[in-house]
Each structure stands twice: as structure tokens, then as C-alpha cells.
Amino acid sequence: MAGGQLPRNLRRLRRERGMTLEALSSRSTVSRAMISKIERGAAVPTATTLGKLSAALEVGLSQLLGDARTREPTLLPRAAQAVYRDPATGLERRSLSPLFPDRSVDFVLNTLPGGGHVVFPGHSLGVEEYLFVRRGCLTVVTGGERHVVDQGNTLFYPAHVVHEFHNENEEEAEFFIVVDDTRTR
């Protein structure tokens, strides 16, 4: 079965919202057939598709990928961290923060191979992201504006617009993102 928790979480979140496959397809612009394949674990979506589904369901990516926890001190061993690999771009996204049902902050480690790029649709209005490049260099495009973020540098941006990550180098880039949607709650 592809996608770890994703198939079960996608189906559960869709049903909790009273949405049919057709309704989610219409709202997300992801085909009904692809949504069905993801829910059955027969396909792993691209990061762009995952972003569209997340936006349509009004949840963070980690809520689609991870396991919910109770709000108490929580050690999240590496083996328990939700990991998503985009089959089209090679992006690896590791959720470093525990998933709480009411979570409004998400801490993520991303690795993008040399020459890779990935596009995410915008989040809800009010969602903000803080990006730190740990290794390599990354070009980030937000709202049509291009930012080159070298190793050790940080970029803040409102994330309600399409945002793209480009690794224009041969070496992989490793970067942390904190997704903050506290203003939307």
C-alpha cells in the first residue's frame, strides 16, 4: 500500500466533511480517479496534488500524512515521523512536529534533489511560512517574486499564494519550514 497514513486520512477527512469523491474532485481540481487511487493506496500523489487536496479539505499537509496525538509532552522518534516522497520531483517531506487535532503550527524538514523543483498551491489566507536553508541553496518563488535563499539564511512569506521551490544546483538542498496557521483559527 502506497502513502503510509495518507490513504486512510484522506478518506476519513473527506467523509468527515460529508464530501463525495466528486465533490472533493471538483473543489481540488484533482481527478476523481486519482483521489480514489490515493484512498486505496494504489497511487502516491505529487506534492502539487497533495497541496490541492490539503487546501480543498482545509487541513495542513501533515494532517493528511501523519498520526494524531494527544496534547502532552511527546517524543516523536524518527520512525514515527510522517515522511512523504513526491514521485515526480524527488522532494522528501518529513513532519517533525507531532500531529495534534487542533494543531496550528507544523515543523517540517524538506530535501530537494539537485535540479529539482516543486510547486505548492496556496494555503488559506493568513497561513505564513518561515523557511531556513540548512544545506545547499534554494530559489523560492512566492506570488511571482523570486528569492534566492543561501545556506544559513531564512525567508518569511505569506503562504496563501502559490509557492515554488527550485534547487538550481547539482547537490541536494535541505531546508526546514515552519507552517504557521495560528492567524486562521
Image (spheres, helix red, strand yellow):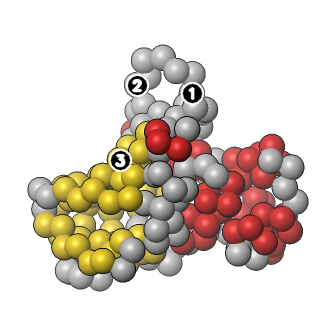
Circles 3 and 2, Cβ within 8 Å, touching? The answer is no
Q: Residue at x 78, y 52 (%)?
A: 14
Answer yes or no: is residue 79 visible.
no
Circles 2 and 1, Cβ within 8 Å, touching? The answer is no
For residue 75, which numbered disc appears in the image? 2
Give the structural element (helix, strand or loop) at label 1: loop
Give the structural element (helix, strand or loop) at label 3: strand
Q: Earlier in the sequence, mark 1 or mark 3?
A: 1
Q: Position of residue 77 (x, y in %)?
A: 40, 33
**Within 10 angstroms of label 2, few (less than 14), some, or many (20 or more) residues?**
few
Q: Quadrant of the N terminus?
A: bottom right
Q: Earlier in the sequence, mark 3 or mark 2?
A: 2
The residue that disc 1 covers is 69
Q: Earlier in the sequence, mark 2 or mark 1?
A: 1
**Within 10 angstroms of label 3, few (less than 14), some, or many (20 or more) residues?**
some
Answer yes or no: is residue 67 visible.
yes
Q: Position of residue 124 (x, y in %)?
A: 55, 56
Q: Position of residue 86 (x, y in %)?
A: 49, 69
Give the structural element (helix, strand or loop) at label 2: loop
Name the front one of labels 3 and 2: 3
Q: Residue at x 71, y 74 (%)?
A: 30
